[in-house]
Amino acid sequence: MKVSEIIDQLGLKVISGEKGLDRGISGAYVSDLLSDVMGNAREGQIWITLQVHQNVMAIASLKDLAAVILVKDLQANENTIHHSDEEQIPILSTSLSTYEITGKLYALLNKQ
Amino acid sequence: MELNFSIEGGDFTQAGQASSRVKKVLKQLGVDVKCIKSIVIALYEAEVNVVAHAHRGHILIQIEKDRITTTIEDEGPGIPDINLAMQEGFSTASKKVREMGFGAGMGLPNMKKNTDDLQISSVIGKSTIVKMVNYF
């Protein structure tokens, strides 16, 4: 499944990094601890988090993640958005909590 | 081949610059992908440690035929008890750093897990030197 395909189905907003919307999704990782993501997330995963600063994109890029979903309508910092466009890794936004969006994404990815 | 980077303490925008560059260089050199992933994790954590704890630091990357050696030398508070610092979950990071999602006490363990050889030496109140070797 591609990043673009989950946007409609989960009602996500695309904040930045539109050029990366055709990235393939291999799964997802949920964590707000950056070293946890650095050590354990895998290539092609969607990262669900409440962190909004630009180090999120540094990690997403280093780990070749498919996209980042920010929960609870949290706003990404300006330099985070800039970095997302530059790296072509989308930042997506949801009004849902981590629990809710993770459950929905899990169900969607396992339906395939 | 040698690469050099300088890091200013406290400037989180800089964290990841060295690891990003090294990742690109190793890819161009055709180094095994799994090996690159490990080096990138370890180097990123080292960068964050300098930014989070030290006044400034310097990174020297030496790439040889069969290995990459990373030496990170900083001017900072030093590490009083290295064995304690190596324990998962132990951290001396500030509140601000923790709020960013760093400082979970996973950095040094991540470095250990992702390098073939990790050596840390420190002079309290002066500096810390971290040397990491990864074989291709």
Image (spheres, rainbow, N blue to C red):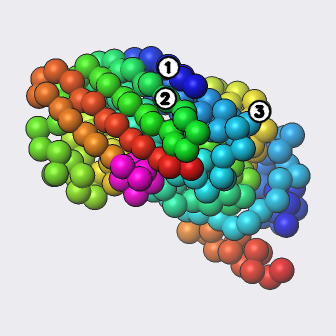
Query: Which residue is denoted by mark 3 in the rendering?
Result: A85
State the extent of the magenta-drawn residues as a range.
B110-117
In the rendered structure, the residue with mark 2 lies on which chain?
Answer: B
Q: Residue B61 carries which label?
A: 2
Question: Which of the image's four quarters has the N terminus of chain B?
Answer: top right
In the rendered structure, the residue with mark 1 lies on which chain?
Answer: B
Instruction: Tell me: residue A75, above or below residue B124.
Output: below
Instruction: Tell me: residue B87, above or below residue B31.
Output: below
Q: What residue type is labelled 2?
A: Ile
Q: Which amino acid does label 1 sit on?
A: Asn
Helix, strand or loop under label 2: strand
Which residue is located at x 16 percent, y 51 percent? B83
Residue B70 shown left or right of residue A82 in the figure: left
Residue B43 spot, x, y in % from top left: 47, 39
Q: Is residue B62 visible?
A: yes
Mark 1 to mark 3 CA distance (whole Å): 27 Å
Count of number-bearing discs: 3
Residue A27 shown left or right of residue B122 in the figure: right
Mark nearer the N terminus (2 vs 1): 1
Which residue ends up furthest to the front in the rendered image? B65
Circles 2 and 1 in contact, beta carbons < 8 Å: yes
Q: Which mark is residue B4?
A: 1
Q: What residue type is labelled 3?
A: Asp
